Image (cartoon, grey):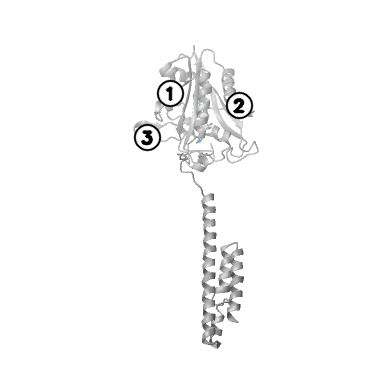
């Protein structure tokens, strides 16, 4: 009897719909019962063999069963969709009354951080912080520092010459000249700033880099005073034991002159591109101020003497933060800068 068979399929399908736990299961029930090859669709083939009365009863049972199943499927489907939506609303909840996060704060460049630390240290030791221009005269950059025209020492600093005899300063040493001429002795000054050289750029050389000049002029200043200040400086910067070596260095504006090198903190000694495989990094050239330099700036070398140093600030930042390529320093790359 077709109506009884339909009733059986209907009640089984309704039970499966009630027990379904997902939209996928519901779709399975729909395909099994109402799909083109589903169990209810099979009956229409048998209708031809029925009497008119039987066909009317079977047709009514079939249509009723189909619409009941469709209604039950719709109701369950809506329930699942509502549950999914409310789960999503719970998960993606947003408190619009919270204050906006605002712009991300920036940070000081590593070279600026070190520069400020050294300035604080030297100010506490009674030094003034001076500034000089990046565009300098030939006299302040060279002549007044005992480097006359045609002196081979000029070749050591490949110079960017400008029109009218001016130049981009190749070191911060011209600020020594400006300091001596403006303030006279006794003098304790430092001068941080940019220097420029027409150099082949590699892992340890930039055309634009930072130095920090220092000068102390007084009576009876000795190499012992110089070494004391340099040790105080390095101790404050590295907060740990740094191996240093002092070797004779030639700069026309100091006599005697030294190169203070530190053991490479990137590789710890065996050699790397930053220390040019030598294990040492040239950091702090220094010496006692040459009498000619004092004399040219109007200071009597019989009465006064002093020491001077020219710290490579960019290289110092590299050592301090283990930066293995100087080209990163001025790259402006935020992936680099946000680490400091
Ligand atoms: C000088 O510039 C001297 N004016 C230093 C000085 C001052 C000596 C006072 C004595 C008394 P030098 O050319 O060696 O010296 O440079 C000083 C430091 O600047 C170097 O030790 C190095 O750390 C840094 N430096 C030099 N050239 C570059 C460069 N191309 N890139 C990055 N750092 C550099």
Residue holding disc 1 = 144
**Residue 246, disc:** 2
Mark 2 vs mark 1: in front? 2
Q: Quadrant of residue 182?
A: top left
Q: Nearer the viewer, residue 244 or 131?
A: 131
**Relative vertical location of residue 196 with respect to residue 28 in this rendering, above or below:** above
**Relative vertical location of residue 124 with respect to residue 27 in this rendering, above or below:** above
Mark 3 vs mark 1: in front? 3
**Residue 162, disc:** 3
Question: Label 2's element?
Answer: strand
Q: CA distance from mark 2 to mark 1?
A: 26 Å
**Residue 106, disc:** none
Question: Label 1's element?
Answer: helix
Q: Nearer the viewer, residue 118 or 48?
A: 48
Q: Position of residue 213 (x, y in %)?
A: 49, 25
Q: Is residue 325 left or right of residue 299?
A: right
Q: CA distance from mark 3 to mark 1?
A: 19 Å
Q: Position of residue 146 (x, y in %)?
A: 46, 24
Q: Is residue 237 left or right of residue 156?
A: right
Residue at 60% x, 82% y is 1
Q: CA distance from mark 2 to mark 3?
A: 36 Å
- Residue situated furthest left in the rendering: 164
Decide if ligand 1 comes within 8 Å of the CB at mark 3: no
Marks 2,3: beta carbons within 8 A: no
Question: Label 3's element?
Answer: loop
Q: Earlier in the sequence, mark 2 or mark 3?
A: 3
Q: Position of residue 281 (x, y in %)?
A: 58, 34
**Relative vertical location of residue 224 with respect to residue 97 in this rendering, above or below:** above
- Residue situated furthest front in the rendering: 53
Report whether residue 335 is seen: yes
Q: Position of residue 59 (x, y in %)?
A: 52, 80
């Amino acid at each position: 009897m077709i109506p009884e068979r339909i009733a059986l399929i209907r009640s089984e399908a309704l039970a499966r719909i009630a027990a379904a736990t997902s939209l996928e299961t519901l779709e399975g029930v729909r395909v099994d019962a109402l799909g083109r090859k589903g169990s209810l669709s099979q009956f229409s083939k048998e209708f031809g063999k029925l009497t008119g009365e039987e066909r009317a009863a079977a047709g009514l049972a079939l249509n009723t069963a189909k619409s009941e199943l469709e209604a039950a499927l719709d109701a369950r489907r809506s329930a699942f969709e509502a549950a999914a939506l409310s789960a999503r609303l719970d998960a993606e909840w947003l408190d619009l009354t919270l204050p906006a996060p605002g712009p991300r704060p920036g940070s000081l460049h590593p070279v600026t951080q070190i520069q400020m630390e050294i300035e604080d240290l030297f100010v506490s030791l009674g030094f003034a912080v001076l500034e000089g221009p990046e565009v300098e005269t030939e006299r302040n950059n060279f002549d007044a520092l005992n480097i006359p025209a045609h002196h081979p020492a000029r070749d050591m600093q490949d110079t960017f010459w400008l029109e009218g005899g001016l130049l981009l300063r190749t070191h911060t040493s011209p600020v020594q000249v400006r300091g001596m001429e403006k303030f006279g002795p006794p003098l304790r000054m430092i001068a941080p700033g940019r220097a420029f050289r027409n150099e082949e750029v590699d892992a340890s050389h930039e055309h634009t880099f930072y130095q920090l000049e220092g000068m102390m002029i007084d009576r009876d200043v000795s190499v012992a005073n110089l070494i004391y200040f340099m040790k105080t400086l390095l101790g404050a910067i590295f907060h740990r034991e740094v191996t240093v070596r002092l070797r004779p260095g030639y700069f026309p504006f100091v006599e005697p002159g030294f190169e203070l090198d530190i053991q490479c903190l990137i590789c710890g000694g065996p050699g790397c591109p930053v220390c040019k495989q030598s294990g040492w990094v040239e950091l702090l050239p220094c010496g006692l101020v040459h009498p000619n330099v004092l004399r040219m700036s109007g200071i009597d070398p019989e009465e006064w003497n002093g020491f001077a140093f020219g710290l490579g600030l960019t290289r110092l930042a590299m050592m301090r933060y283990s930066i293995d390529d100087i080209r990163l320093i001025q790259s402006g790359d935020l992936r680099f800068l946000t680490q400091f």
